[in-house]
Image (cartoon, rainbow, N blue to C red):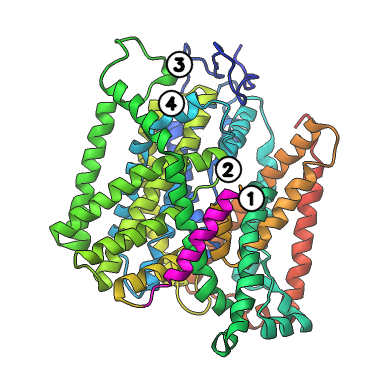
Amino acid sequence: MSKTSLPENAYRELREGEEYQPIMSAQTTPAEATPYSVTVGVIMAIIFSAAAAFLGLKVGQVFEAAIPIAIIAVGLGGLHKGKSMLGQNVIIQSIGATSGVIVAGAIFTLPALYILGLEAQFYQVFLSSLLGGILGIVLLIPFRKYFVKQMHGKYPFPEATATTEVLISGEKGGKQTVVLAIAGLLGGLYDFAVSTFGAWAENISTKMVGWGAMVADKFKVELSLNTGATLLGLGYIIGLKYAVIITAGSCLVWFVIVPLVGYASAEAGAMSASELFMAYGRPIGIGGIAMAGLIGIVRQAGIIKDAAMLAVNELGGKKGGEAVARTERDMKMKTILTIIIATLIATLVFFQFGVLGNWLQTIVALLIVFVIAFLFTTVAANAIAIVGSNPVSGMTLMTLILSSLVLVSIGLNGTVGMTAALIIGGVVCTALSMAGGFITDLKIGYWLGTTPAVQQKWKFLGTLVSAATVAGVMIILNKTYGFVGENALAAPQANAMAAVIRPLMEGGQTPWVLYFSGAILALVLTWIGVPALAFSLGMFIPMSLNAPLVVGGLIAWYVSSRSKDEALNKARFDRGTLIASGFIAGGALMGVVSAILKFAGVDLFAADWAVSSAAEWTALVMYIAIMVYFTVHTMKAKKEE
């Protein structure tokens, strides 16, 4: 009889001589990559690539698709009664979850081309995402054993844990899909009413009352909050701790730095709080993000050395020819090296004939991509393993600064230089995003007992499909909404990239003092034990997009701490995770539907009403209503769920 629960030692460190035995043992041959699982995985990759691209460009946060896809896989698997679907569901999740990581790599960088008045062709977005994704896969594989096996129980892997629990529930005949579907429908219609019809205001702020408008105008102090269901769900999954840390960064900028700068001079006093944030607050956050990335590399030096030795030993055949258990079987190192070399050659050709046209500059660009991607791979994987969030935007900012300085030193600047630096950043960003996301898939497979080599091989297909989808969606969204001007998509990370690269390439004034201040702040935060990366991210993402994360985090804390029975608290939290995932998936998918309608020329938006005071008060009432729904229905969970 097959096990349907994780072993007792799944989440803790192993005792001396103790071995972890997955649910699907190494002696079994479960169905994994079948026509069914591959087809469904590809469909999930297409759908969630489109949804995640819209969400990320609008609010700056790319939701991790693993949990919603796992839930859908479980629901579909329930139709195959009597069959064990666990191995196939892992492959569905692994292929489909490629969507989120590829999207993050693309939208954090490449929309900056449009923001800077340049053009991004389909093939540039596609190849940047594809080549970066492949690099991320092959550079991570040698580190798999270190992260998922040698460090067993030492890293929490929050997202992998949640996804694994969902997949296991499928083997028990779980009914979570109904909860997810209802929440997805509700969250989708809620956000659709705002984005398509303007039924109420998308953001509310203290300026909706008289004293708030006076304080914002005179003292440059303003609190704003996005009322969407999507961000509410995202905050729940992130959790209260990191939501507070991220928003604390916003509070420092909006409640301390912006008012102080606005008070310092008449010129600054004439600027609005938002303008002061863009000019002063965001560069400080950029400096903090870059320094947090450097600190991560220094901390992970030992990991790079140890994992590299494991790969060298395998390549040298030091195993003595002994058989490798199915659950420990990776792609062969010779195959990995072949793919790395082929990918680097393809990148060289892409850079030379599709971007630069100068062999010296092309070779330098290729070296930048490979060295930084290799060094930061472990940083991205470690961040995912510990906190469940991928710090690719900060590491990419550092890549842009470094690559811009290097390219300028060899004579490349202006519009060609900006295009080259951003495409280089896109390749690196996608590689790091893939490395962080893929370690989650491999940890899930380790706990459940899938074959690593199977996951690794089919991840390439997910990368191809997701890269093509995000390239098409980005071009459609640019034509529909744009990234510059009124009602444009926010694309906060891409705007930060554009702000960094323009002065470096065009010879303008670069705010080095502000970058340096942010770097010093990151060092101090690290010294006192505060996650510098999360705090710095909060400093350059608008307050309206961070404050809702705290609201969602508070709901997560509340529902999981009301009972003295920890099992009941866990059941409530798990049900809340399903509802939050539904809000995220439904809101993002309906956002894509809204974009398609606008692209087709269907304009149903009540623009005058949406910016009225009445619309803001209506938004507040609706936001409270959806919070109450979220909390009440989460508290209805019972232990047997």
> In this view of the protein, which residue sits in the foreground, 579 or 118?
118
Residue type, mark 2 in image: Val
**CB within 8 Å, label 3 to label 4:** no
User: SS of the residue at dot 4?
Assistant: helix
User: SS of the residue at dot 3?
Assistant: loop
> In this view of the protein, which residue sits in the foreground, 600 or 303?
303
The answer to whether any part of residue 92 appears in the image is no
Rendering coords of residue 211 (x, y %): 78, 82
Instruction: From the viewer's perspective, tell me whether residue 442 is left or right of residue 550.
Output: left
**CB within 8 Å, label 1 to label 2:** yes
Q: Image quadrant for the N terminus?
A: top right
Residue identifier under label 3: 29
Residue identifier under label 1: 242
Q: Residue at x 26, y 38 (%)?
A: 340
**Eye-nearest disc, 1 or 3:** 1
Q: State which tag comes first along the sequence, 2 or 4.
A: 4
Residue identifier under label 4: 145
Instruction: State how far apart marks 1 and 4 are (Cα).
Output: 28 Å
Rendering coords of residue 556 (x, y %): 73, 47
Residue 321 within the magenta-colored segment of the rendering: no
Residue identifier under label 2: 387
**Eye-nearest disc, 3 or 2:** 2
Instruction: State how far apart marks 3 and 4 are (Cα).
Output: 21 Å
- Determine whether 114 is above or below 157 in the image: below
